[in-house]
């Protein structure tokens, strides 16, 4: 913790160059976004995905770039009009493959690594969702959405396309369901599953006829809505494919039972389940480079999505398995292996940061490599690492480091000019004694243009999850710098339930949504006011989304004294109805100790609707119409309760957004409405 505080104190040093304007929401949406880095086979070049904002078109434009690891000017490989994503290198390093929509269908393409004309590799009639090239580069494994009934058809892609193309005279739009999980995140189910297919590629790089590998699996590979190619992998010899998928027999809407399977790449046998013994979540298979071991992540508690992901090793010859680093009290993410096979690399949240870690395979010893800020992705070379890193004052760029994480060197600077033109707020982490006398962490961000001796209005941000954290990262929705740029100070607390402080701390929120977390927020607010005299306790608003929105509703009836206004984005109003209307029922059932009908008391214990009579603080309510996680009825109920109570309130609805506000114009509108609401109630005239 001492080293973390030291790093945070460094953040209070003002930038050397004076900025021309405070950071705004427009600055946020116009930042170029670097992601999905891929290291070339010779380890000299990295390909990357760059998203640039076309504000006039209200969308992002995607393209593929390369940059030398030794440093140098990045090279654009694809035009933004092609909207290319997901760069991957050919086995010989001569080409970079990517996904792009040709004729409206997302297909696999390739472009010479030194630049040239891009060409489509295949012309399937369905979108390719994700892909991975075989180790020898002669085949491609990819995912596509297929109707379950088409799995047994000799041409499952054509079968699916035929079903999608309804006859012109069929004007019906009804969808009949006979089992749950009818919608997920922001999409209604149409009966298709994401399945893995394999296709050979000729010397000209063109697709052969695909063959379905997972037709007997009634599940999504990769998982939806956020799964990617880290959920499946080739064996080193390319003869076997490993993947994870949810066990539907456990009940899809209320189960987290993912298992890891293998299937012959030639489709000669049915998939084999390697983790049937574990009824909790198994994920992200990674075969070792020598082909003898399968590394993967595993939870131990069925139904709990925020359980600790431990790192496991399965001996493929003997079937014996062991946990690597069982005493490491952090939850790992997708793994990568060192060239010599002695080390595994992963990222995870840790004390307000999201570092890169190295784990010794034989001893389980864990070493923190790149610790400050957020590591969003990484690549492992023979002698070096490529790290995609950001922090509270800088968006993601690529860096290189040696295998010990030292000699960190920035190799991309896509937003350098923009950053020179804006001023951001300095920040500092602090700790205090929270609920049960446990140490709790938060941080404070000063307003842009801060002047000593001046008191500033405060945006008190409450994070969602609830098993998440406000960390030292550059966020594109809840970015403290957008408030600092408006002249607000920011305070945020990583209350009981937050990640990065040990699994027991994360577990503490389940069944106690309005208990210890609220106590932490109260004590954290008091600690911040005591430590930072520039915070104006009489001009503060609390705001949050998802669980943060729930907490805003809970605060409205249980701790409304400090706040001049509240902002609830897609927050829970009625915990009991949420037990039926949300799509991922496993979440509400774990958090409330069972189903609504078996444990109604668990749902009512911290139910905001039971305290509406105590509401009195003006509230802005925001709701995405396509939010199936916390549906529109929750936001409408909140707004109706406010209106019925005669409390000043506004409702901002986005008909075309889900749980998140993603479109550039909507993002700017969201920030403008939110900031104006805070200004309205924290201005000196509002006192």
Image: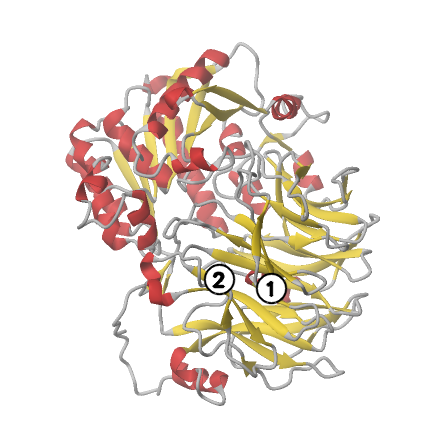
Q: Quadrant of residue 27?
A: top right
Q: Position of residue 536 (x, y in %)?
A: 43, 16
The answer to whether residue 531 is seen in the rendering is yes
Residue lying farthest to the bottom in this orientation: 154
For residue 231, above or below residue 364? below
Q: Which mark is residue 318?
A: 1
Residue 2 is situated, as x and y percent measured from the top left of the image, at 62, 21
How packed is label 1: few (under 14 Cα within 10 Å), some, or many (20 or more)?
few
Q: Which callout, 2 or 1, points at the residue further toward the start of the chain?
A: 2
Is label 2 or label 1 in front? 1
Decide which of 278, 170 is in the foreground and name it.
278
- Horizontally, is 640 left or right of 444 in the view? left
Mark seen at residue 155: none
Q: Is residue 376 visible?
A: no
Measure the alpha-carbon separation of dots 2 and 1. 14 Å
- Left/right placement of residue 628 relative to residue 122 reads left
Front residue of this view, candidates 382 and 572: 382
Q: Residue at x 38, y 52 (%)?
A: 302
- Residue 333: x and y, percent? 56, 49
Foreground of the two, 25 or 290:
290
Q: Is residue 236 above or below residue 165?
A: above
Q: Secondary structure at mark 1?
A: loop
Q: Residue at x 24, y 46 (%)?
A: 636
Give the quadrant of the C terminus: top left
Q: Identify the residue position indicated by label 2 in the image.
A: 275
For the image shown, how many numbered marks are present on the structure? 2
- Kindly state the secondary structure of the residue where label 2 is placed: loop
């Amino acid at each position: 913790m001492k080293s973390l505080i030291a790093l945070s104190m460094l953040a209070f040093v003002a930038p050397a160059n004076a900025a021309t304007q405070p950071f705004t929401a427009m600055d946020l949406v116009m930042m170029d976004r670097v992601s999905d880095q891929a290291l070339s086979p010779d380890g000299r070049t990295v390909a990357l995905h760059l998203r640039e904002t076309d504000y006039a078109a209200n969308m992002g434009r995607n393209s593929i770039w390369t940059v030398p690891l030794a440093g140098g000017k990045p090279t654009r490989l694809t035009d933004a009009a092609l909207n290319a994503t997901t760069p991957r290198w050919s086995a010989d390093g001569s080409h970079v493959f990517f996904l792009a929509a040709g004729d409206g269908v997302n297909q696999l393409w390739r472009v010479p690594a030194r630049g040239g004309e891009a060409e489509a590799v295949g012309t399937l009639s369905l979108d390719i969702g994700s892909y991975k090239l075989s180790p020898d580069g002669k085949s491609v494994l990819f995912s596509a959405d297929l109707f379950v009934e088409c799995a047994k058809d000799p041409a499952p892609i054509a079968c699916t396309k035929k079903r999608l193309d309804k006859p012109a005279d069929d004007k019906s739009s009804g969808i009949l369901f006979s089992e749950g999980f009818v919608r997920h995140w922001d999409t209604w189910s149409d009966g298709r599953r994401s399945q893995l297919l394999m296709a050979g590629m000729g010397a000209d790089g063109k697709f052969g006829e695909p063959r379905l590998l997972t037709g007997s699996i009634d599940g999504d590979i990769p998982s939806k809505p956020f799964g990617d190619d880290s959920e499946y992998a080739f064996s080193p010899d390319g003869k076997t494919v490993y993947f994870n998928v949810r066990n539907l027999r456990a009940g899809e809407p209320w189960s987290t039972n993912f298992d890891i399977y293998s299937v012959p790449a030639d489709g000669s046998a049915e998939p084999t389940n390697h983790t049937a013994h574990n009824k909790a979540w198994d994920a992200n298979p990674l075969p070792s480079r020598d082909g003898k071991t399968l590394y993967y992540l595993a939870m131990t508690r069925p139904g709990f999505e925020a359980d600790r992901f431990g790192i496991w090793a399965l001996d493929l010859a003997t079937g014996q398995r062991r946990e690597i680093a069982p005493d490491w009290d952090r939850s790992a993410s997708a793994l990568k292996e060192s060239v010599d096979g002695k080390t595994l690399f992963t990222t995870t949240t840790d004390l307000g940061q999201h570092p890169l870690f190295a784990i010794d395979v034989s001893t389980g010893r864990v070493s923190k490599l790149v610790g400050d800020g957020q590591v969003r992705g990484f690549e492992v070379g023979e002698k070096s690492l490529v790290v995609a890193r950001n922090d509270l004052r800088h968006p993601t760029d690529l860096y290189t480091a040696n295998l010990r994480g030292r000699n960190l060197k920035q190799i991309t600077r896509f937003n350098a000019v923009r950053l020179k033109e804006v001023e951001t707020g300095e920040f500092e982490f602090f700790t205090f004694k929270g609920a049960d006398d446990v140490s709790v962490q938060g941080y404070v961000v000063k307003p842009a243009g801060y002047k000593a001796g001046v008191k500033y209005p405060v945006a008190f941000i409450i994070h969602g999850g609830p098993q998440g954290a406000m960390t030292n990262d550059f966020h594109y929705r809840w970015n403290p710098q957008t408030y600092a740029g408006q002249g607000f100070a920011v305070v945020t607390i990583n209350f009981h339930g937050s990640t990065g402080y040990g699994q027991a701390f994360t577990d503490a929120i389940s069944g106690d949504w309005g208990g210890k977390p609220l106590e932490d927020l109260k004590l954290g607010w008091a600690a911040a006011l005591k430590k930072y005299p520039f915070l104006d306790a009489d001009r503060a608003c609390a705001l949050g989304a998802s669980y943060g929105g729930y907490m805003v509703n809970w605060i409205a009836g249980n701790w409304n004294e400090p706040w001049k206004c509240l902002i609830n984005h897609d927050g829970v109003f009625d915990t009991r109805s949420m037990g039926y209307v949300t799509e991922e029922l496993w979440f509400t059932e774990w958090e409330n100790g069972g189903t609504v009908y078996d444990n109604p008391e668990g749902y009512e214990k911290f139910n905001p609707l039971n305290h509406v009579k105590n509401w009195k603080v003006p509230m802005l309510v925001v709701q995405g119409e396509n939010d199936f996680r916390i549906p529109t009825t929750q936001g409408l109920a909140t707004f109706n309760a406010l209106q019925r109570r005669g409390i000043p309130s506004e409702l901002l609805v986005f008909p075309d957004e889900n749980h998140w506000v993603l479109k550039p114009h909507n993002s700017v509108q969201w920030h403008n409405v939110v900031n104006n609401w805070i200004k309205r109630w924290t201005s000196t005239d509002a006192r």
